[in-house]
Amino acid sequence: MNPASPDRVVHRGGCHCRRVRFEVEAPAHIEALDCNCSICRMTGFLHLIVPAARFRLVSGEDALTEYTFNTGAAKHRFCKVCGVKSFYIPRSHPDGVDVNVRCLDAGTVEALRLVPFDDNDRDAATAAFAHLTHE
């Protein structure tokens, strides 16, 4: 991960038991996607999708377990100890990493704006946010 650009900061975060820890380079003013699909709605996941190069798993690789369903494209990664999914590889952006904004440590997020992501029209919603994993 490169040093943060002028419009981005390094956010730190992880799971509840703190075994899984990560860093992600993203704006301090976050636009998070609020998806209405079954798993996101049930878990309250708020999406911050970034290019893979802007994400670094600091610790806890050995504490992660993976869950897939439906197409198997999304790689949902959960802490085996506390059960929290702090990040995963999304179906919509398999070349990026999707961080749960709710799992970021306090102190670096200056503003948060929620943007709806309608899974009922997945193709259109994905196309509208295709730019998220491009540098």
Image (cartoon, helix red, strand yellow):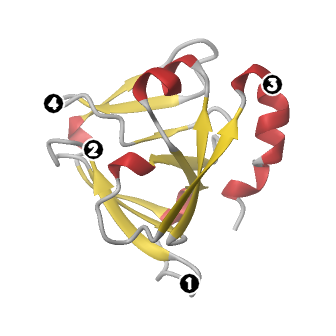
Label total for image: 4
Measured Cα–Cα span from mark 4 to mark 3: 35 Å
Quadrant occupied by the C terminus: bottom right
Residue 124 vertical placement versus 101 (above, below):
above
Q: Earlier in the sequence, mark 2 or mark 4?
A: 2
Q: Which residue is mark 1?
A: 5
Circle 3 residues within 10 Å: few <14, some 14–19, many ≥20: few
Check residue 81 in the rendering and tell me which mark sits there, or answer none. 4
Measured Cα–Cα span from mark 3 to mark 2: 33 Å
Which is more toward the observer, 28 or 134?
28
Q: Earlier in the sequence, mark 1 or mark 2?
A: 1
Which is more toward the observer, 45 or 123?
45
Which is more toward the observer, 91 or 108?
108
Circle 2 residues within 10 Å: few <14, some 14–19, many ≥20: few
Q: Residue at x 39, y 67 (%)?
A: 11
Q: Residue at x 49, y 30 (%)?
A: 75
Q: Nearer the viewer, mark 2 or mark 4?
A: 4
Q: Earlier in the sequence, mark 4 or mark 3?
A: 4
Amino acid type assigned to the residue bearing label 3 in the image: Asp
Residue 30 vertical placement versus 40 (above, below):
below
Amino acid type assigned to the residue bearing label 2 in the image: Glu
Measured Cα–Cα span from mark 2 to mark 4: 12 Å
Q: Which residue is mark 3?
A: 121
Which is more toward the observer, 57 or 116?
116
Amino acid type assigned to the residue bearing label 1 in the image: Ser
Q: Nearer the viewer, mark 1 or mark 3?
A: 3
